Amino acid sequence: MSYGSGAYIYEIASDWGTLPNGHEFNQVAGVAVDQEDKVYIFNRSDHQVMILDRQGNFLTAWDANFSNPHGIHIGPDGNIYLADRDAHVVHKYSPDGKLTLTLGTLGKPSNTGYDLDEKIVKRVAGPFNLPTGIAVNEEGYIFVSDGYGNARVHKYSPTGSHMLSWGTAGKINPGQFHLPHGICLDNDGLVLVCDRENNRIQVFTQDGDFEGLISELLQPTDVCVGPNSELYIAELGHRMTILDQNWNVVSRWGGEKSHNPGQFVAPHGVAIDSHGDLYIGEVLEGRRIQKFIRQK
């Protein structure tokens, strides 16, 4: 069975991902692909960072523990950035798995007045309160979406110095966020922020100036960019959407909760490899990763 439409047709890679005994996929919060097409899985199980090749063969797992795995990003220089949501930090690791930088203060959220029961950000603040995602530009500048308990984007220097922040809590105006979730840089260097609970993606310059809005989404959780500036958007509303460089829908599937292969339960992370194949991680009761093979 095929999925998608137009020039973006996919077939599911059945049972992709062979793991050793004692390893499992359990809420795949984030997924990223490096320049060698190795697939990094940020996973809420006992083995939280697992690395597979593009055929799904297990390569290794890191001996590291995180409070709540969320977003993952591989920078242009091959370093791996991980958002540990409940620890209120972002970690930078070298390609061989060594911790080289931590942004934020471990276990100390910024004072936003966030109420876990009401899920309301009463005021914006500095980094971090339950951060969600990371993007890194060619020069090594780091952008962090923040997050469940804040309503901001933060920019850092390559050495980890906080440079600026933007965003306020809200549901209507540009620059207002209701759970800034995934984040990426497009091929023009613009910052795309998944404004999840506002069902939209907001687009900014790297200095935080508003540039545009992508609307009519179903709780976008993550976005990545293809070689032709197309956008691949994972939506918590059990859907996958692909937009062209002008933000027009060119392919879309899912939309109804289903555990069947090729359909979705709460997509949370998306990545594309050099062959155009997609890797989509699912959370809540989804608890899996699926690979979609692009049909030429």
Image: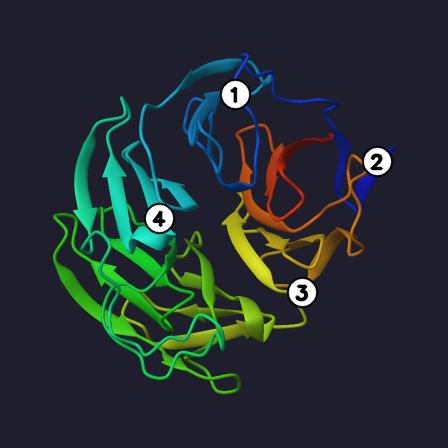
Q: Earlier in the sequence, mark 2 or mark 4?
A: 2
Callout in the foreground (3, 1)? 1
Q: Distance from label 3 to label 2 (Cα)?
A: 22 Å
Q: Identify which amino acid the numbered label 3 is placed on.
A: Leu
Q: Foreground residue, 89 or 94?
A: 89
Q: Earlier in the sequence, mark 3 or mark 1?
A: 1
Q: Identify which amino acid the numbered label 1 is placed on.
A: His
For the residues bearing labels 2 and 4, Cβ distance under 8 angstroms: no
Residue drawn at (67%, 43%), measured in percent from left and top?
Answer: 286
Q: Distance from label 1 to label 4 (Cα)?
A: 21 Å
Q: Earlier in the sequence, mark 3 or mark 4?
A: 4
Callout in the foreground (3, 2)? 3
Residue 168 disc label: none
Q: Which residue is mark 1?
A: 23
SS at mark 2 in the image: strand
Q: Which residue is mark 4?
A: 83
Q: Foreground residue, 33 or 113?
A: 113
Residue drawn at (35%, 68%), measured in percent from left and top?
Answer: 205
SS at mark 1 in the image: loop
Q: The C terminus appears in which quarter of the rendering?
A: top right
Q: Identify which amino acid the numbered label 4 is placed on.
A: Ala
Q: Foreground residue, 201 or 6?
A: 201
Q: Residues within 10 Å of mark 2 (few under 14, many from 20)?
A: few
Side of 284 relative to 13 (left or right): left
Q: Residues within 10 Å of mark 3 (few under 14, many from 20)?
A: many
Q: Residues within 10 Å of mark 1 (few under 14, many from 20)?
A: some
Picture layout, residue 283 above or below residue 205 = above
Side of 4 relative to 279 (left or right): right
Direction right: furthest residue: 1
Picture layout, residue 103 above or below residue 150 = above
Q: Which residue is mark 2?
A: 2
